[in-house]
Structures are given as C-alpha cells and as structure tokens.
Image (spheres, coloured by chain):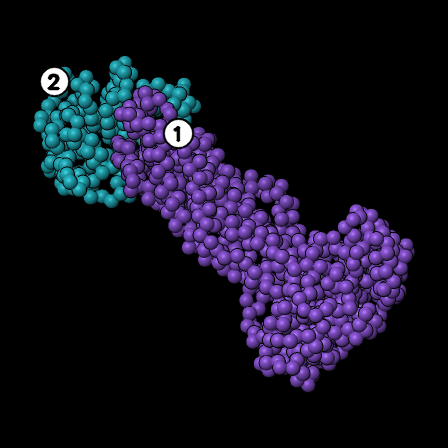
Amino acid sequence: MLRNYFKTAWRSLLHNKVFSIINLAGLTVGLVCFMLLAIWLRHEMSYDRFHEKSDRLYMAYNKATLDNQVNCWESSPSPLGPALKAEFPEIDQMVRTTGEQFLFAYGKLALNGSCFITDSSFLSMFSFPLLQGDKYTALRDAHGVVITETFAKKMFGNENPMNKTVKINNTTNFTVTGVLKELPANTVFGFDYLLPWSFLNEMGWDRQYWGNNAFRTYVTLKPDASVDAVNKKIAGITRKHSGGHEKVDVFLYPLSQYHLHNKFAEGHPAGGRIEIVNLFIAVAFSILLIACINFMNLSTARSEKRAREVGVRKVVGAGKSGLVLQFLLESMLLAITSFVLAIVLVTLLLPAFSQLTRQQLHIDFAHPFIWLLGAGATLLTGLLAGSYPAFYLSSFKPIVVLKQKIVTGKASVTPRKVLVVTQFACSTVFIIATIVIYFQIRYAQNRDAGYNRDNIVYAGLSGQLGDKFDAVKNDLLTSGAAVAVCKTNQSLDNARSNSWGLNWPGKDPNANIVFDMMATTGDFEKTFDIKMTLGRAIDGKNFPTDSTACMLNESAVKAMGLKQPLGVLIDKDFVKWHVVGVFKDFVWGSPLDVTKPMMIEGADWSNIINIRLNPARSTQASLAAIGNIFKAYNPDYPFEYNFLDEKYARKFRDVQMMGTMAKLFAALTIFISCIGLLGLASFTAVQRSREIGIRKVLGASVQNIVLLLSKEFLWLIAIAFAVALPVAWYMMNGWLLQYNYRIGLSWWMFAAGGTALLLIAFGSVSYQAIRAAVTNPVKTLKTE
Amino acid sequence: MIKISALEKVYRTEEVETVALNKLSFEVRDGEFVAVMGPSGCGKSTLLNILGLLDDPDAGSFLFNGIEVAHFNERKRADLRKHNIGFVFQSFNLIDELTVFENVELPLIYTGVKPAERKKRVEEVLDKVQIMHRRNHYPQQLSGGQQQRVAVARAVVNQPKLILADEPTGNLDSSNGNEVMQLLTDLNEQGTTIVMVTHSEHDARYSHRIIRMLDGQTVTENINSLL
C-alpha cells in the first residue's frame, strides 16, 4: 500500500513540473533560511555553556542607584574576589581578570598581543583545554605565561613554545608554561595570552581600592550552594569594606546568561542580545510558514484534478485515513527533497552567512544536532504543508467529484485567501522593517559627530613614546606628517570610562549624575576640531595648573545646572578640578544614543596618541614618516595604528547586520510569496480560461481581462497590508525605542512598503493575467 | 440481490427543491442484466449512486443481499462496496499517474490482497479484456476503447457480485462501444449481476430487462423483447 502511495506521489510530482518546481524552490529557500538561522541561533545560545562548571559559574555584578535609576554593571574592584572567597564558604573558586595590550617579544619578533592578567585558578575554573602544560600550575609561577595556539604559531612558527623565554612589555622576561588549544568561537573571552595576577602588583597597578571598578570577578559556587541565598549574604560586601563610601550592592549573575541576557533595567535582567535572537527565531519560522503556505495553496488550487483521483480511489475502496496518509506522504516527499537541496545550499552559503553574522559558524555533520534539526524541520514542513491539503482533498465525496466539477466558486477559496493574506502580511512587515532600519542607520550615520574624524590616526603610547611624548610630538609636527597631536587616556571611538558621585557648589543633593570621563594634556580641540563654546581648552604646556583643570561638554553644564561654569570647582577622587572651558557635545559612545554629560580632565594619565595627518601630504607618506619617528624612540616595537574614521564606522556593525539580515529575509520572503502567487494566478487563469474565452467573444478587451484576474489578488494584498500595518508599527516602534537617537516613524515608510509590495505582487499576477487575456478564445472554448 | 422500495431522494438548494427519486421501487435478481433508461434529469444517476452505496436515500428501504443498507454509515458502506460492487464510468476515471496494471491492481490493494495473488489476478483479468500487451502504459497512451476496457478490468478484478455501469459507451465510437458491451455481456454470462444506465437503445438491447424512468419514478419495466 505504502509503495503504491509513494509511486503515485512521486509520479504526481514529476507530472506537474511547474507545481513541483515552485514548491521545491519555496520549501528549499524556506528550509535554507530556517537552518542557517537555527545554526546561528544555536551558536548564540551556546556561549560559555561548554565549561564543565558552567552551572556553577557566576560573574560578580555591581548594582547602584545613579541618576535616579538602578544601574547594574559587571566590572568590579580588585579586592572583591579575594574577600568573597575568604568570607563566604559557599564560594568555591574565585578568578579576577583585566585585559591589557603588551608587547610580546621573542628573539627578533615583537607583536602587540592582547592579554588577560588573571588569578592562577583561571584554567581550572574555565574549560579552556591546554595542549601543553598543567592547568593547576601553569599560572602559579610569577613569571609564567600561557599562550594560545594561534598566537604561539605567530610567535614561534613551528618551534615548540614550551619553556621558551619571552619579553613582555619590553621590560620583564617570562617563561612559556602552557599552550592553550584555540579558544572556541562561542565564548565571551578573547585573548592571546594569560599572565599571572602578580604581574599587576609588579607594575604597581593593583590598587586595593573598593571604588576602582576596573576588573572582572568570576566565582564558582560549591555544588550544593544556592545562588539566591549567596546573593542575599554578599550584597553588602563592598559597603562594608569601603566603610559605606561605595554605595553599591554586589550580586552574582550566571556566566552562561551573560552573552544573551546582559541588559539590566531597574536592577533586573531585561534582555539584551536575546531580543535579536528571538526576533530571528520568529523570522525563521515565518519564512518556513510562508513556504508551507505555497504548498497548501497550490495543492488545494489544483484540487479539481486531484479530486477525481480521490473519487476513484474512494470508489475502489480507499478509506479517508489512507488518503490523508497518501497526501501527507506527497508533501513529505517534497519536504525531504527540499531538505537534501537545502543541506547542500546551507553548506555552500555558510561561509557568507558567517561573515554576515560575524560569527564562526560551522556545521558539524557528526553531531546529531544538524540531523535532528533537519529531520525536525522537514517533518514540521511536511506536516504543516501537507495537513490542510490532505484533509481537504480526502474529504471529497466521490459522487460529487466524479460526476460533476467540484465547486470552485467564491466560498471554496476562503481558507486559501486567508493563507495568501498571511503570506503577504509577513512580507509587508519585512519590507517596512527594512525601510525603517535603513533610514535609522542613515540617520545615525549622517549625524554630526561633533568632531572631524577624517585623517586622524591613533596609536598606543607604548615603550618610550609615553615618557618622551613632548619630543615625539615635536618630531611629528616638524616632520610635516602631522598638523596636530594630542594624548588622551582613551580613544575617541570607544566610550569606556565614566564616573559618578562628583560634587560642586550648588549641586542638587539628590542628583547623582553619571559623567563620561576622559583625560588629555592639551591640543585636544585642535586635533579633533572640537568647538569650544566658552572659556579655553586644556593646555598643560602653557598653564601648568591645568593638571587639575577640566572641561565640560554642554550637556554636562546643562545637567549640572551651572549658570557660570568657568572657575567652578568640581570635587572628584579627592581632587578639586577647576573648569576652564566648555566644549560643544560630540559623539563618544554610540551614535545611536544621546550625548551624555562629559568631563575631560587635564591629568596626565594618557596612554593613547592621536595624530591629525597633514592634509597636504599623502596618507602613505605621512604614515611612513610617523612610523620612522616611532621606530626611533621604540626600536623594539612594531608600528601599529588605527584610523579613527574606520573605527567610528564599526559602531554601526550590529545595526548594519540587522539591516542586511532584514533586507535579505525580506527579499526571500517576497520571493517565496510571489512564486506562490504566480502559481496561484496561473491556476486561476487556467481554471477560468473558458470564462475568459466567452468574455472575449462577447467583446472584453485585454485590459478588462487583466483587471478581472488581477483584481481579486490585489484585494488580498490590500487586506494583507491592513493586517501588517499595526504589526509593523508595533514591532518597529519597539525596535527604535532602544535607541535614544532615533527617527520617528512616518506614514510614508508604511506607504512605501505597501506600494512596493503591491507593485511586486501585481507584477507576478499580471504576467499570468496577460497571458490568459491574449490567448485566442477559439482555443479555450474548443478544448472545453 | 437488490430490492428497493419507496426510495426517496430530494436535493435542496436555497430556492429550489428537486425530487430526484420519488417512491421508487424495483428488484434486481442475481445474475440479471438490467438497463435503466430515461431522459436527462429523470433520476437515473441518483439511483445508480444509491445502488453503488456512494449516496444514501432520504427515505425508503434498500436491501442488498437481504441486508438493509439504506442507513449504513460511510465506513460500513465503503466496506460493503469494496467487496461487492464494481463501477464502470462514462469518463473511464482512470488515475493518470498509474499504469494500466497499477490502475487495475488498486482495488486489490485496498482489500488487502497479497502481492503475488494480486499479480496473478490482474494479469488474468487484463488477459480477459485483451489489454495485457499494454499493461505498462499510462492511460493517456491508450485509445478511449482501451481505457474503458481497463476500467472494466478494474471493476471486475475484485470479482464483485454487482457491476454498476454509468453510460459505459457514452464516450466511445460504435465499434469500441460494441466491444465494451460484449465484454459486459460476457461477464454477465459468467454470473455477474449488471445494472447499466444508458441513453442508448442499442446498448440497452444487450440487457435482459429495461427499466424506464421519468421524474424519479418507474414508468415501464419490460423484459427485453430481443431476448
């Protein structure tokens, strides 16, 4: 019996080539999207779950009320970890980390590598396997370094790196005590090598100060400990040790949650990257659904033909359940064929998709995931697509279908209309989303950053460059390569420092403003073309007292409520900073966010040199000159630099990825919907060919016929648009709300989406309509 | 074999009520060959559908082999049908996707006959209707007469007691038509009961008895004078 079903199903697919190709194309594209997204989502959700102790691994978070909001952040002070371990028996292990860039030199080769300075239990807390060395002792040695496989290849080539002596930061010799297997792609950690915590002490950087949140602290709990109970006990630890000076609470947060759920609102987890993940889960399922709808629609549309077969089978003894099985088999067969094609396409497309998502995605064919996923998706597709046609077709009464034509009047297509509306509503939502995302990106990209980021390079003040900064600056300016040079403690593309608890005369005692913090010694405004609106800029060369001077941005002046900002003394970190100038707001953090209050101090703790290149010279020549000057001071260091405008452009990577994905999936959804519509239209045209013939004989023009055939589909599109409108508005409004610097939703974005869809749909319907309309009526009337 | 009495069937739409069968009664004995004739709309097809257990009457009695089947449910009717009744349609109704052999095999699959037995029986019956040489062809590759012979083969492969034929020669030319009528006569002579609806006086002459209908009722019933 099953063999007979298979045979019929297979021959039926071969026999109706157009139908099969449309469905195969739709289902394959649907499955490809579904599988690519599933692979990506699985990767996103696997972050840091591979650690053996994953269920006991936590990060220490701080929580404090600032600006009347409860803020949570994951950096913590250096003494926190040891105190947690010493005072609470529930805590099993503790590890602190801080990231640095140091020169790593072996023989003649020297490279800047990013490192983690960390406690010795790092390798036993996290599951990063060692290729060589012992995980318990590798970081015990005060001058032992553990390097990753890739970095070892770069530094040592084919030599065995173990026990080799290397020079770090151009100052201290270390011995390689371990080689780590390449870090997996699904971890939030990223480094080239690990150094023991003692090195921080050696350099005098480990301040035992509870207010310096410059580190990350990780702990594992004992297996029987409850995190809720521990969180109650540890909350006040920072207040206790700082004598109440630091008004922050400490809590533990699962590391496995960090990658996807790292946004907090009012002290509670409030999503994060998971929102994008959920959004794309919805996208994956809607694409598959849209592809399934094609199958349902086309199967029921050609039911007239299949109806006779159903009738015959019933007459010769088939039961309803057998027929349902037969039709489900048919959709299954199609789904399985699509799956095979999809696997091939997914394998081919994965590298491009990895690039798009900026993740290292791969398919592990040995792992059951891909097969379970494939089988699941195929089964789902087959059942979803096949069930409606199966029950619809198998319910035909033989006497009706064998003796007369089944009714294909207006009532019988209602479920089909609903399905078409669903498809096109999804497509409309995608089109509108694409439009909104495009304009939001453009809006933020066109935003005046408040400074001129072209022609600026910056580099780390490594080696002698920091100590002999004035001489370096002088050489750069006299060489003609640079027109302005300044040093800062951070680069202008990345806001990573802020401070609160500042005081000044007349401050509202209830206000607790968070300031973005930067430091420079002078020529800041010249280098970046930043406009001073009041007073002067910091100038340590001509005003020696500027080491305790500061400048504020306009937002800060406004937030602080200062009428006369110049000369105001601001109390911060036990220093009184006097305001010498006010500058126009510039974008430091995300261009999608409003500018925050900012304070730039005149203190000299800079580690970055910013250079405005001479516009009259070629960039190449200037860079060569700068490289020579750097080499003169730092012969052991490689010349590494960044272009500020390139770094600035990177701020848009995430939102651009969203934009590209939205575009891609909108296009695919429309494609699938349209080939479905095309198929449906061609069936209608065939079904109504006699009617069209008669109408033509009676004098209908081609336009009349095209309109007649297109009208009913265009109606459906209009309804789909009406359905999609509120959904798209709700979704895109929610999406925009996450950006403080954003466009408003305008009616024309929706209108443009609707018009685009209407045109595309009309294009696919009218082709069939015109073809039907120009057919000679003699042909259609005769064949009846 | 068949005894119907006071059979009624009414079709209703919103505006019109059409009486298809109006207290119709007659009997068909085992081994008979009966032709049902009458103008379009007289209720012949409705009658055939009810006799074939494809449709149920609104009122009246229908005894099939002495069992009251008028109010059997769909499942019971299907079961009775597949073991006892074969159909031949005017428009052949072969499945395009199946070969001649497979079309004829279909009823045997649904009644659960084993493959080896199926092969034997299908070949036998294809031989009988002289279409064995085209067993691997698809319906579209056959002439109308050949298609109808396949349809007849399909109708008899299960060895039904009753064959219902609905204008079996309606789509055939006269020589092909005669061949099919000869085939039915042969089957009848081997013991199969046949009820045939037809417009053709020529075809009706092959039968033992002609029932003439008008407006859902029997007008005349006469033994075929030619016999």
Mark 1 is surrounded, within 10 Å at the Cα level, by few (under 14), some (14 to 19) or many (20 or more) other residues, namely: some
Helix, strand or loop for disc 2:
loop
Q: Distance between the residues labelled 2 and 1?
A: 60 Å
Above or below — where is A315 with respect to A55? above
A700 or A195, which lies in front? A700
The residue sitting at 28% across, 18% down in the picture is B172
A537 or B25, which lies in front? A537
Residue A489, quarter of picture: bottom right
Mark 2 is surrounded, within 10 Å at the Cα level, by few (under 14), some (14 to 19) or many (20 or more) other residues, namely: few
Residue A782 seen by the camera: yes
| Amino acid type, label 2 | Ser
Residue underneath mark 2: B225
| Amino acid type, label 1 | Ile
Find chain A in the image and tell me its colour: purple
Residue underneath mark 1: A770
| Rendered-image quadrant of the N terminus of chain A | top left
Left or right of A590: which side holds A125? Answer: right
The residue sitting at 26% across, 31% down in the picture is A403
The residue sitting at 28% across, 25% down in the picture is A699
Helix, strand or loop for disc 1:
helix
Left or right of A239: which side holds B162? Answer: left
Q: Which chain carries label 2?
A: B
Q: Are the residues flagged by discs 2 and 1 in contact, CB closer than 8 Å?
A: no
